Image: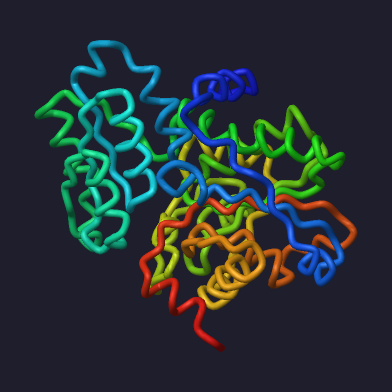
């Protein structure tokens, strides 16, 4: 099972490649929330999201023969860009399978890193089949988006970094909240904090109607959902948690929460106003949970991971529009 040593080793591999993202806070928000809110803006990471960390950690460990065969991944956008950028740095061919309705900024950015993009119809649900065909034809190595120890270890460096930065401020994180899709990022962070700050309570946050991790945690087993409504959080639209990720999250997470699209848009607007950062919907859900009072931080120091900022202009304009 993944452990803290794996995360520490991933942090060493990422040195000089992944950016150590800062901690941000707002006196005004702290006053309104009656607590101390620390934001870790992974939208400032390479490729505009946290996904670069896991992708680079995984790809950098490939053998010479595996690198020669290239890599393939399926993603709605952020993992796609992370894999494409990591592969470019390491001079490896990358093929990315993406849904045709992914935000255009994510598709274009992925292409800009030199990856070949293969589009599929999300409604057909055939991304795995398309990816498997590429693997069979080319021998390329599949780089999973979350359910993989090396990916989780890379994402877990966020938690390691966050805990050390908080310590540098003379505080401990009593709460940590982060967006959740497959569960790799929040699970990796939970493992890091379990060693560095074992009393920290950790919460996953998902979009309303796509709260498979929250439901699974409550049920004590992996639940598959059948959403009947869509969400603006394109990066977080999953129907069931990963096997490896849920094993970790079931042990270490305090609870799973969910937020509406309207709450998410308000968080995007607040992040822009208070921190001068651009967040995509999926990157803002944990912040929304705190701002909307779903996660009470009164009298506490809370950390929130804002995972990405790859948002189409129209979606961002809508979030900033007067209510």
Farthest residue, direction left? 137
Task: Answer with left or right where residue 189 lies relative to residue 36.
Answer: left
Q: Is residue 4 above or below residue 212?
A: above
Task: Please tell me in which quadrant of the rendered image residue 28 appears.
Answer: bottom right
Q: Position of residue 263 (x, y in %)?
A: 59, 74
Q: Position of residue 300 (x, y in %)?
A: 86, 55
Q: Position of residue 181 (x, y in %)?
A: 48, 51
Query: Colour scheme used in the picture?
Result: rainbow
Farthest residue, direction top? 64
**40 or 151: nearer the viewer:** 40
Q: Is residue 251 above or below residue 62?
A: below
Q: Is residue 115 above or below residue 138?
A: below
Task: Answer with left or right where residue 89 lies relative to residue 7.
Answer: left
Q: Quadrant of the C terminus?
A: bottom right
What residue is rendered at 50% in x and 83% in y? Answer: 321
What residue is rendered at 69% in x and 39% in y? Answer: 162
Q: Quadrant of the N terminus?
A: top right
What residue is rendered at 57% in x and 57% in y? Answer: 215
What residue is rendered at 33% in x and 32% in y? Answer: 143
Q: Is residue 90 above or below residue 111?
A: above
**30 or 216: nearer the viewer:** 30
**100 or 122: nearer the viewer:** 100
């Amino acid at each position: 099972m993944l452990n803290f040593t794996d995360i520490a080793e991933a942090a060493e591999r990422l040195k000089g490649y992944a950016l150590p993202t800062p901690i941000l806070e707002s006196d005004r928000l702290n006053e309104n929330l009656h607590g101390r809110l620390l934001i870790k803006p992974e939208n400032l990471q390479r490729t505009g999201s946290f996904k670069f960390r896991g992708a680079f950690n995984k790809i950098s460990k490939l053998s010479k023969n595996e690198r020669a065969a290239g890599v393939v991944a399926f993603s709605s956008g952020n993992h796609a860009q992370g894999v494409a950028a990591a592969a470019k740095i390491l001079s490896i061919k990358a093929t990315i399978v993406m849904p045709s309705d992914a935000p255009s900024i994510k598709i274009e950015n992925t292409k800009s890193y030199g990856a070949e993009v293969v589009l599929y119809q999300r409604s057909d649900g055939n991304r795995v089949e398309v990816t498997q065909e590429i693997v069979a034809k080319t021998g390329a190595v599949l780089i999973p988006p979350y359910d993989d120890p090396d990916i989780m270890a890379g994402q877990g460096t966020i938690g390691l970094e966050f805990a050390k930065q908080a310590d540098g401020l003379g505080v401990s994180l009593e709460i940590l909240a982060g967006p959740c899709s497959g569960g790799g990022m929040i699970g990796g962070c939970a493992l890091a904090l379990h060693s560095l700050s074992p009393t920290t309570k950790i919460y996953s946050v998902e979009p309303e109607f796509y709260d498979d991790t929250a439901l699974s945690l409550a049920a004590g087993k992996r639940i598959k959902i059948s959403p009947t409504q869509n969400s603006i959080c394109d990066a977080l639209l999953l129907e069931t948690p990963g096997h490896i990720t849920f094993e970790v999250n079931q042990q270490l997470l305090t609870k799973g929460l969910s937020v509406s699209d309207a709450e998410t848009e308000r968080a995007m607007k607040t992040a822009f106003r208070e921190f001068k950062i651009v967040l995509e919907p999926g990157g803002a859900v944990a912040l929304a949970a705190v701002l909307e009072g779903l996660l009470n931080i009164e009298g506490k120091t809370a950390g929130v991971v804002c995972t990405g900022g790859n948002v189409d202009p129209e979606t961002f304009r809508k979030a900033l529009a007067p209510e």
